[in-house]
Amino acid sequence: MAEKMNPANNDSPAAQDDIMQGIEGMIGNLLSSTISKMQKNDMSNQIGGLEQESSEAGDEDSLYREMDITDIKNLVNVMQKFIDNVNHMINQLEDGPASAISGDEEFLDGYMATADNVLEIAAFSMKDRLTGLSNRYSLDNRIILEWNRATRDKSPLGLLIFAVDGYDEKLHDEVFVKLAKTMENTIKRSTDFLARWSDKEFSTLLPITDISGAAIVSERISAEIEKMAAEEGYSGLKSYIGVCVLTPTQGEQPADLINKTHKAFLKAKETERGIAVHEDE
């Protein structure tokens, strides 16, 4: 970005174009991330959805699909700041030589402010507003990235889907905020990716993790949830965890990992221990 702020010291069209291309790039990023957030699209065209028998959980409540009125107001405010900053920069370009403007401190501040606006908009798309964790949209993108990496490296990729029940629904938000914080402290490796899967479910993506490693993580999650429940007085709180690990092979897709993990999750609800590992028939 600094290079764009230091075009050749002349007033040539190329110098001005260099600055405008930077602005146009920011606008493109802004529009892309905004559209991704506001569209009711769970990326099913890219990675596929859950199989019919397991699609009901989280389908209506998928949190990244819609924004509430507060989110929309915040988004509009950020977009207005972005537009004001860009308009101010354009006015400066029209009023003065590009070489002088490009080194002007006020112009540089405006340029950096637009970049901050883009990051703010991106945050609407990637974070769950209640827990602050990455959301399903962000997780879907990460699964594609890690699946491609695992395919290339022929390495195992693990996925956990888990949830809790047995709590007073009036305490839903309180329980989920504390649960998210507990999970952030439980997931140890920087490469592991924790997200809120849906209104009721969480998920953790485990790159380069075999089935024994994924089982260890699931046991740790179960133990920490039990510990949290005891400390916070959530009597009756129970966790359910589905576990699956795949080393991608020809013909398999990320949706296979998702569906198999969710099948294991549904099975976990039927077991006394609350943990189920997917096993191919």
Image (cartoon, rainbow, N blue to C red):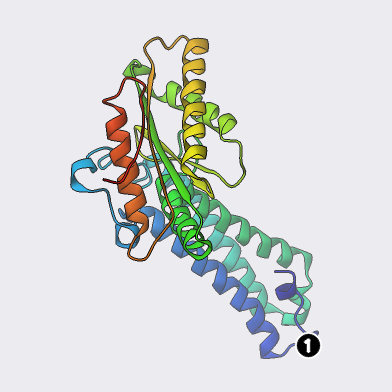
Q: Quadrant of the C terminus?
A: top left
Q: Residue furthest front?
A: 281
- Identify residue for label 1: 10
Q: Residue 253 location in percent, x, y?
A: 35, 60
Q: Residue furthest bottom?
A: 12
134 versus 31 height, above or below: above
Residue 196 can be seen in this image: yes
235 sits to left or right of 81: left
Snapshot quadrant of residue 201 = top left
Image mark count: 1
Residue shown at the point (27%, 48%) measured from the top left: 50
173 sits to left or right of 14: left
Q: Looking at this view, is 4 or 175 the one in front? A: 175
Snapshot quadrant of residue 240 = top left
Residue shown at the point (60%, 62%) measured from the top left: 85
Q: Residue 193 location in percent, x, y?
A: 52, 44
Helix, strand, or loop for circle 1? loop
Residue shown at the point (35%, 39%) measured from the top left: 198
171 versus 68 height, above or below: above
Q: Residue 150 location in percent, x, y?
A: 49, 58
Snapshot quadrant of residue 175 = top left
Characterize the local packing of mark 1: few (<14), some (14-19) or many (20 or more) Cα atoms within 10 angstroms: few
Kind of residue indicated by mark 1: Asn
Q: Looking at this view, is 237 or 28 the one in front? A: 237
Q: Residue 263 location in percent, x, y?
A: 28, 40
Q: Residue furthest left?
A: 53
Residue 65 can be seen in this image: no
Q: Looking at this view, is 196 or 11 the one in front? A: 196
